């Protein structure tokens, strides 16, 4: 729980963690062979399959590292030199995964949309049909633009063509609807500090049996630390309740992971998705009341964050510190094309279950806008927030 005088952390990760999660890992570091870590590891692997909606034959991996490490792991295990991949570009992080594929020596066909939009499915299928393709790389929610793709038709197009798929769910997993098994995704990856609401330091992914088999066919092995085949016996041992060693796991974070996944499953994954949707709709109503506009269209905007246009003549450097002084830390722009014109509010994980956090955030943004002469008042925005959250919950 935040002290009432500490500003809330409402950036697109890291985010606030629940009191139960915070106390779970606030202990002396346990050994990686301890029974506490074995139990946390094993239960987390089983829970990940459920939260990801993955099949029993899919393999979860838990990696010490950030989301970027998870992206590198996925690319290094599936993409070989000389192979062709198609990247659906919706922002800064899709550009990053495209660069990772280039560094593996792949030829990269980028299907891009202007910042704040997403390419049409037909443009992606046309790219898949331009030549033999190893993998389709998709960013579920690009955190720079706040754009969400619709993964289902993209993954169906990949499956029909026997193309492997990697979906970067770093700003989405447990916050946006995703059915790994039903939609036929090969890798769905995330990081601890986004919608899972854990402290940063874990890269997480679930890998299909098909993708694991594809790793065996690589001509160039991945770097050792990133190699699924190095980690596979370790993860299998832990899942069977036996501790094993390849490289030291982040033991405190495993305690946090099992606590966080337990909390998500106690609410129900579907209920968590719905809470993100309700929060997003509530906040959009509040932003409109404050005269703020989203960069993406309503249909393409994510539930996990708002990428907002700065009011004309207002610089992020003036506005953001004032919002923070009123109780909520929000983030500046990230995508190079719109960096100077946007700011971002994260609303994911534990925070969306706390309506008081959402209200404090709206109030801080309203007061910050007033400080820079944009005469916003909080009350109508708070009323719009409450009304829209209630409506979204009622229609769920
Ligand atoms: C945050 C984020 C990343 C990078 O994660 P790090 O933990 O910062 O390495 C990658 N992709 C998306 C979509 C993200 O939101």
Image: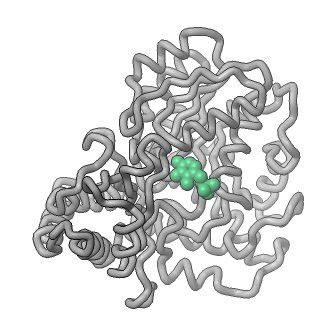
Q: Quadrant of the C terminus?
A: bottom left
Q: Quadrant of the N terminus?
A: bottom left
- Please give the name of the residue rendered at 44% of the width and 54% of the height, measured from the top-left corner: 333
Q: Nearer the viewer, residue 15 or 349?
A: 15
- Identify the residue at the far top of this view: 130
Relative vertical location of residue 17 with respect to residue 70 in this rendering, above or below: below
- Please give the name of the residue rendered at 39% of the width and 58% of the height, measured from the top-left corner: 344
Q: Position of residue 334 (x, y in %)?
A: 49, 51
Relative vertical location of residue 212 with respect to residue 353 in this rendering, above or below: above
| Side of 46 relative to 73 (left or right) | left
Q: Position of residue 276 (x, y in %)?
A: 34, 58
Which of the 4 image quadrants contains residue 5?
bottom left
| Side of 331 relative to 383 (left or right) | right
Q: Nearer the viewer, residue 192 or 344?
A: 344
Q: Is residue 385 visible?
A: yes
Coloring basis for residues = one colour
Q: Position of residue 357 (x, y in %)?
A: 33, 76
Which of the 4 image quadrants contains residue 255?
bottom right
Q: Nearer the viewer, residue 50 or 353?
A: 353
Which of the 4 image quadrants contains residue 212?
top right
Q: Is residue 177 visible?
A: no
- Please give the name of the residue rendered at 25% of the width and 43% of the height, measured from the top-left corner: 298
- Please give the name of the residue rendered at 53% of the width and 66% of the height, measured from the top-left corner: 14
Q: Position of residue 4 (x, y in %)?
A: 38, 89
């Amino acid at each position: 729980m935040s002290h009432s005088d500490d500003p809330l952390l409402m950036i697109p990760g890291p985010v606030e963690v629940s009191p139960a999660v915070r106390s779970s890992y606030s202990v002396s570091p346990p050994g990686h062979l301890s029974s506490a870590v074995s139990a946390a590891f094993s239960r987390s692997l089983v829970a990940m399959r459920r939260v990801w909606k993955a099949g029993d034959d899919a393999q979860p991996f838990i990696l010490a590292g950030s989301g970027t490490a998870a992206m590198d792991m996925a690319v290094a295990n599936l993409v070989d030199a000389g192979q062709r991949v198609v990247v659906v570009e919706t922002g800064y992080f899709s550009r990053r995964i495209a660069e990772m594929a280039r560094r593996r020596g792949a030829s990269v066909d980028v299907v891009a949309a202007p910042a704040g939009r997403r390419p049409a499915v037909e443009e992606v299928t046309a790219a898949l049909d331009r030549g033999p393709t190893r993998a389709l790389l998709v960013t579920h929610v690009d955190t720079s633009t706040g754009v969400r793709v619709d993964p289902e038709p993209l993954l169906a197009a990949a499956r029909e063509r026997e193309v492997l798929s990697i979906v970067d769910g770093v700003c989405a997993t447990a916050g946006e609807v995703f059915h790994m098994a039903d939609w036929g995704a090969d890798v769905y990856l995330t990081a601890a500090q986004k919608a899972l609401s854990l402290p940063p330091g874990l890269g997480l992914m679930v890998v299909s049996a098909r993708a694991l088999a594809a790793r065996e066919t690589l001509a160039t092995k991945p770097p050792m630390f990133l190699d699924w085949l190095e980690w596979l016996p370790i993860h299998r041992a832990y899942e069977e309740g036996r501790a094993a060693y390849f490289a030291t796991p982040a033991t405190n974070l495993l305690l946090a992971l099992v606590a966080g996944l337990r909390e998500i499953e106690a609410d129900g994954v579907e209920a968590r998705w719905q809470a993100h949707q309700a929060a997003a709709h509530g906040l959009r109503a509040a932003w409109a009341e404050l005269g703020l506009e989203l960069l993406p269209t309503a249909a393409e905007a994510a539930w996990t964050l708002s990428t907002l246009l700065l009011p004309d003549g207002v610089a992020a450097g003036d506005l953001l510190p004032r919002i923070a002084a009123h109780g909520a830390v929000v983030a500046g722009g990230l995508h190079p094309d719109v960096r100077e014109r946007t700011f971002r509010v994260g609303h994911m994980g534990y925070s969306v279950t706390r309506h008081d956090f959402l209200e404090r955030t709206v109030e801080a943004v309203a007061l910050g806008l007033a400080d820079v002469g944009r005469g916003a008042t909080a009350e109508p925005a708070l009323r719009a927030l409450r009304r829209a959250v209630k409506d979204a919950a009622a229609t769920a």
